[in-house]
Image (cartoon, grey):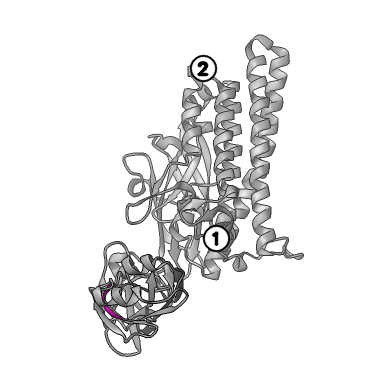
Amino acid sequence: MINLMYLVFIAMIAMNMSKEVLSAFGLMDAKFDESNETMTEMNTKLLANLETKAEEKPAEFATAAEKAKQISTVSDQFYGYLASLKSSIIKKGEYKVDPKTGKLPFEEMDKTDILDETWFTGDRLTKEGQEFMDKIAAYKTDVKKIIGDDVKYGRAIENFEKRFSTNPEPNADGKKLQWLDANFKGFPAIASYTKLTAMQNDVKVTEANMFNVFLGNTLDEAVSLKNFQAIVIADKSAFFAGEKFQGKVVLGKYANVTPTGLSIGGESIDLENAIDSTGAARLDFNVGGVGEQKIEGTFTFLEDGKPLEIPIKGNYVVVPRPNSATISADKMNVVYRGVNNPMTISFAGVPDNKVSASGSGLSKGSGMGKYIMKPTSGREVAINVSATLDDGSKVSDKAVFRIKDIPKPSGQIAGQIGTAKLPRKNVEIGRIEAVLEDFDFDLPLTVTGFKIKVEGKPSITCSGDRLNGAAKSALASAPRGSQVQIFEIKSRTNGPAIKPANPLVIELTN
């Protein structure tokens, strides 16, 4: 079974687009695939064993065997559906399998828009996104219906529910996100592809657990150490090249059993200093080169007066030290003069409290990696970022952003911009507005005055955002079909000065 560290690793670095990280996802996907093949063979044997027992002891195993076959059927259907989603990612991304290695081009699978466009539309899910959520819910419903209400299966159902939980999850700022957003939105294609493979692994684990429950193997798991697994748990799931690996090896369920021996990579470990109060053995050694690395060894215990060796098999992934910062404007690739431009600034693999950024008009915002940029003068602004790594060394980077003025607004009346056709009464009582078209910031404008020109009449200056008495009198004399011009529309904000809005030309319809 693939170690939990892979799933933690996905959550930690899903947004890092470096080739090494994309390749690491590919390595993890391959591990999940290998595990799925192994578990498929194991589950086939477990199901055959149940069917044999049902023939030999129908009173004891017939019902269990029937439930197992039903579990196998619904699991195969959901597994196949997940496989179709993976195929869709490959097809839409136009990714080709290398004919020499038989592998996908992991380092090229950095697109984030494949599932974003398929599953999400604004703050809502598309038909396809809702179908995915419905398929998960249907699989959970089918499995629980097959299992039934027998209390002896309660623990198995509880674990199954946790495995396929789709409850909202908190992001780095503590804000709750819908499960699909938190796990797939904005992720590179290889990360989403690997996550789907991991879900297929969860399906296989579900089958194995249920089949073992039906066979009555849970008691054996509780009694014999032979059924415990040595698990490698790293202090963190990715390491920079040259760092020391730090983690521990434990038996499944943290069995507090005193070992008599421990060896890693053929070297014996001093148990007196390595074992803690839970029976876990601390590991401390230099990590290998960039990429996937294996941990192999033996954990030795006494059982029935005889030494019992439990193989240790684990994996970890080494990523390169960061040498560039991630600096992005949350709204666009430029910053606007006089307004608060939200930005996210981070250094790959470095905690937020060890990253510092500086620049003219830059200030720390609320939340991890959040900053506010409010430029005032010039045409460009430089942001300098530095970070302190775990070993005390420092790295730095720099990015330059263009500064643009707030665009000229447009005049608007009754929801119409530029030109409008309106009844005379609508113009008389209407409110003149200034709007910033296609501007990504929420910057309300308040009209403070304008001029109006009715055909055959001199222009009239109005204060505020509505026609005054003189303007209404001139409007009353205008013939049907004539044009009314509203220009020099002045407005203000709580921030920077705003240019006069583009004029309005209104044709009277009565």
The percent coordinates of residue 494 (x first, y second) are 22, 73
For the record, the magenta segment spans 446-451
Q: Which residue is mark 1?
A: 292
For the N terminus, the quadrant is top right
Foreground label between 1 and 2? 2
**Residue 404, relative to residue 476: is it above or below?**
below
Residue occupying image coordinates x 37% and y 65%: 426
Residue 448 magenta: yes
Badge 1 vs badge 2, beta-carbon distance below 8 Å: no
Check residue 367 in the rendering and tell me which mark sits there, or answer none: none
Hey, which residue is sitting farthest top in the picture? 59
Q: Which residue is mark 2?
A: 150
Q: Nearer the viewer, residue 247 or 76?
A: 76
Report x, y in % for residue 444: 30, 69
Label 1 sits on what residue type? Glu
Cα distance between the residues tagged 1 and 2: 43 Å
Q: Describe residue 202's horizontal placement relative to residue 371 as left or right.
A: right
Of 502 and 12, the residue lying toward us: 502
Mark 2 residue crowding within 10 angstroms, few (<14) / some (14–19) / many (20+) = few
Rendered image quadrant of residue 495:
bottom left
SS at circle 1: strand
